[in-house]
Image (spheres, grey):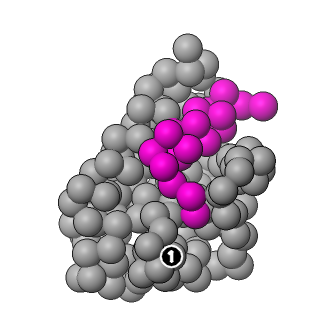
Amino acid sequence: MRPGSRAIADGIIQAGIDFVVHLPDSTLWEVPRLLTEEPGVTVIACTREDEGMAIAAGAFLTGRFAVTLMEGSGVGYSALILARLQVQRSPILIVASHSPALGERNDYHAATRVVASAVLGGLGIPFVIASEGRRLTATVVQAAATARGQRTPVAVLVPDFVMDESAA
């Protein structure tokens, strides 16, 4: 198991998040499996990222706090629902793989690495790019605290290399 997968799952649990929506991707694929093993946590796979964001938004309306796990390109697909989340002041946590610059070695991730930060920045949604495995759990916990406290979506973008760094 990649250490970052455990660190993200631990952060989600420590943040008190009990509703997880995910679209499997090549970086975060282990995290949903870890969370299905946690009592009281609902884990749902979606077929499109914007669908996942909408499900997470609906969860908030029923009193749950949700996280969406997806590839960074999915943030681009989700711009309209993200705008609605902003207008409605609906907090969710977004954990998305890939980032604008750090460790992106494959040219086929070009659109993926560009779209997430552009959409988030354009909509005024706070985001951070994780850069150290040892801080990944705390980053997820603090991003969730900001989402709750500010009643806004907040994103953590996770470069693939961070997933292999030890959390210790």
Q: Residue at x 66, y 27 (%)?
A: 3
Q: Is residue 18 visible?
A: yes
Asked if the stretch drawn in magenta spans residue 64, the answer is no
The answer to whether residue 69 is left or right of residue 155 is right
- Residue 81 figure quarter: bottom left
Residue type, mark 1 in image: Ala
Locate the N terminus and report the quarter of the image it occupies. top right
Magenta stretch, main secondary structure class: helix
**Residue 48 or 64: which is nearer the viewer?**
64
**Residue 73 or 65: which is nearer the viewer?**
65
Magenta residues, start to end? 1-19
Locate the C terminus and report the quarter of the image it occupies. top right
**x, y percent for residue 60:** 43, 74
Q: Is residue 28 above or below residue 69?
A: above
Q: Residue at x 58, y 63 (%)?
A: 19
Q: Is residue 149 above or below residue 102?
A: below
Provide the secondary structure element on which disc 1 rests.
helix
- Residue 105 figure quarter: top right
**Residue 45 or 62: which is nearer the viewer?**
62
Q: Residue at x 49, y 21 (%)?
A: 134
